[in-house]
Amino acid sequence: MKFVVCKLCQAKGVDSKDFAKNYIKNGKCYLPGKFEIIDGNRLKFFKYAFNHQYRDNLYKARRLWITDSFGACSYMLLNTCLEPTGMRFKETDMEKEYQFHFGGDRQFRLNSGRADIVVDGEVIELKRETIDCNAVGQLLRYLKSSGKLKGRLVAPAIHPDALYLILFINQLGFEIKYTKVIIQATKIV
């Protein structure tokens, strides 16, 4: 499945030049996922297929950036609060991968919401990008709602303010930890 980046810009509600202006350096995209330019005969075929399938016009384009679903998700979720339908696979993939390795219950229902995973008396909250203070607060709500004291935040990065908040909360009797993960296009490490 391929996504046309100019259409992603429209869906994100930003200028059509946003992607090229902010995420392309030296002709390459530095967002996660596979991005490529199509032009020439390949573009002619792609435009014909796209226009026929979606009844939408790409006739004026001389070159198009396209991406896979991982790239589309990384672009759509960057610097925005939009959660486009069908683009939420990354966090759920993290949940499935974590559950596969460590067990537990996914999307565990609590009074205060749904915890991503609960395993061995520990509430796990996974995030696609950076853990912030809101994520720490969310985990704390889940811990209070479940009556558990152990929690874990799992993400590629954590904001320094969130680390200080975790230190403070742990002094109150909770045991919250942060685990760094590396997300690759094919797997979570």
Image: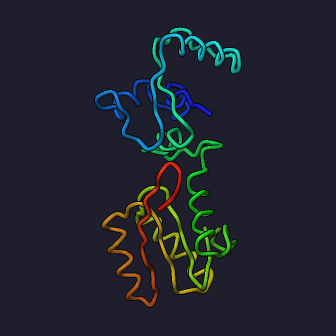
User: What residue lies at 40% left-to-right and 24% top-to-bottom?
Assistant: 17
Res. 27 image quadrant: top left
Q: Is residue 102 above or below residue 157?
A: below
Res. 170 image quadrant: bottom left
**x, y percent for residue 73:** 53, 43
**x, y percent for residue 122:** 56, 81
Closer to the camera in the image, 99 or 139? 99
Q: Is residue 181 left or right of residue 116?
A: left
**x, y percent for residue 179:** 43, 71
Res. 31 image quadrant: top left
Q: Which colour assignment does the render follow?
A: rainbow
Q: Is residue 28 above or below residue 84?
A: above
**x, y percent for residue 85:** 65, 42
Q: Is residue 75 above or below residue 98?
A: above
Closer to the camera in the image, 186 or 167? 186
User: What residue lies at 69% left-to-right and 16% top-to-bottom?
Assistant: 55
User: What residue lies at 64% left-to-right and 12% top-to-bottom?
Assistant: 48
Q: What is the total number of numbered labels drawn onto the structure image?
A: 0
Q: Is residue 53 left or right of residue 181?
A: right
Q: Is residue 160 above or below residue 3?
A: below
Considering the image in quadrants, where does the N terminus appear? top right
